Amino acid sequence: MSYLSSPYKSKTLIPFRSTHLLLFLIWLFLGTILRLSNLASLPPWTDEFATMVFSLGNSFRNVPLNQLIDSDILLQPLQTLPKAGISAVVDHLFTESTHPPVYFALAHLWMKLFPSEAGLVSISAARSLSTVFGIVSIPAVFGLSYLAFRSLLISQLAAAMMAVSPFGVFLAQEARHYTLAVLLVIASLCCLVKAVKNIYRQKTLPISVGLIWVAVNCLGIATHYFFVLTLGAQALVLLGQAWRQTAQDLKALLQPHWQRIYAVVVGTSIGCLVWLPALQAIHGSVPTNWIYDGNPRIDWLAPIGRFLLWAISSWLMLPSAVTTIPLAVVIISGIVSLLFLLWTLPSLSSGLKYQQQNPDTGLATQILVEYLLGAIALFGVFTYGLAMDLTLAPRFQFVYFPALIVLLGAALAGCWQAIPIAREEGNSGDRNSDFNPTVKRVNEKKSGARSKQTPRRPDAQTPRRGEFKSHAKFRSPQSNPINSGVLDPILVEE
């Protein structure tokens, strides 16, 4: 399919109307309330405890092992040390942990802004940095959606999905680095979308975008090592574009617009190789042994089930608190949730297909779908090929989480946009509609028979069957102003 028949609008600013601004503020307010609610109600778990200790520049080595100790000694690593700096944070991370230092350094500076509680760091202060990053992800995913689709409808739906996402709220209420990783994935995807669109139009990627892309990728690796899966999925998307272009022109990869992409690849590779010694040092270490638990090659169904549960949790929360909720409530709510899921999946599939067939949104849909499938494939390679079960922890799903949210928004928008088109085609008596394939095939046979009997002159100006009038409120996907982001169904007037 050619996407050049309906060019994108080259707008640098999002054309907010008052209605869209109000909706966006509602999603932002709702997401903020959900992420701040009961932020300090639960005690920190093991990984959060470690994050707070290392972010303060403290060490666990002062806590004695294999003996009874007083609570004051146990809580000593959570004491704030005014003299501890970022150098202490990095030093303890490299000697006692397996994580890169970017988030911990930021958390160190962040927690200095808050007073201590009886000499100990506040759990609210420790978690609030992750919460801020989680809140910022709402406008960030709005921007990614608009950059990709140039549709305010899709952007609003994606922002709403991110605001109420159970997985997004879950990550934002932990003193961990995953919400920062999500933000960096969104930023990197923005650069990928811009790059692929430029490749498709045979335009050179601006130097500024290339430098930002490299910087974001390097920060991503320095935030979480599994950000490499994001880079791998993006590489698969670029390889797909290269394969399609070389199929038409063997010298396509030598064009100037590809050379800028090669520069980004080289810069990103250098930024990744810097961390290779650290990765070699933590390979096989005790803190990472849990990821090799089990045998996914034998019990191969369990990783698939976990992966589906984590993916569903990005927009639908299945009941999990079986220890605090009556079993009957869990069973009933679980059945209702699964029925709702099965009911919505066909509609979402149709909406996404609508976006794929639309020249205005087809390229963006292709980019994000290929990225999502590439990430899933890499999860499978790590889980089944390297015996590193990445489905054991839901947090690792940050790699594809933003792309899934945007695609859900696009699918919902496709369902919304298909309704008035189908209604208009029905009102106009159009029997040759893509929404009724059976009628379409019958009419194609009839029209073919008529054309054989009475051929027309090539210059005959005969109105095409099903053509809409000029005053029609909605038009076909190829010319529908809603799809280009200029209009929105809730704002179109007669």
Image (cartoon, rainbow, N blue to C red):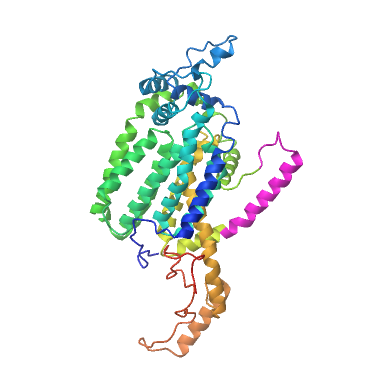
Magenta segment's dominant SS is helix
Q: From the top left corner, tell me how far across and down residue 304 is, in percent.
A: 57, 42
Q: From the top left corner, tell me how far across and down residue 257 is, in percent.
A: 26, 53
Could you tell me which residue is drawn at 48 percent across and 42 percent down?
135
Could you tell me which residue is drawn at 49 percent across and 44 percent down?
401
Could you tell me which residue is drawn at 37 percent across and 67 percent down?
6
Near-viewer residue (377 or 59): 59
Q: Is residue 175 magenta?
A: no
The answer to whether residue 377 shows anywhere in this view is no
481 shown above or below 299: below
Near-viewer residue (265 or 104): 104
Residue 317 placement: quadrant: top right
Q: From the top left corner, tell me how far across and down residue 94 is, in percent.
A: 40, 22
Part of the protein shown in magenta: 319-347
Q: Is residue 334 magenta?
A: yes
Q: Quadrant of the N terminus?
A: bottom left
Could you tell me which residue is drawn at 73 percent across and 46 percent down?
332
The answer to whether residue 143 shows anywhere in this view is yes
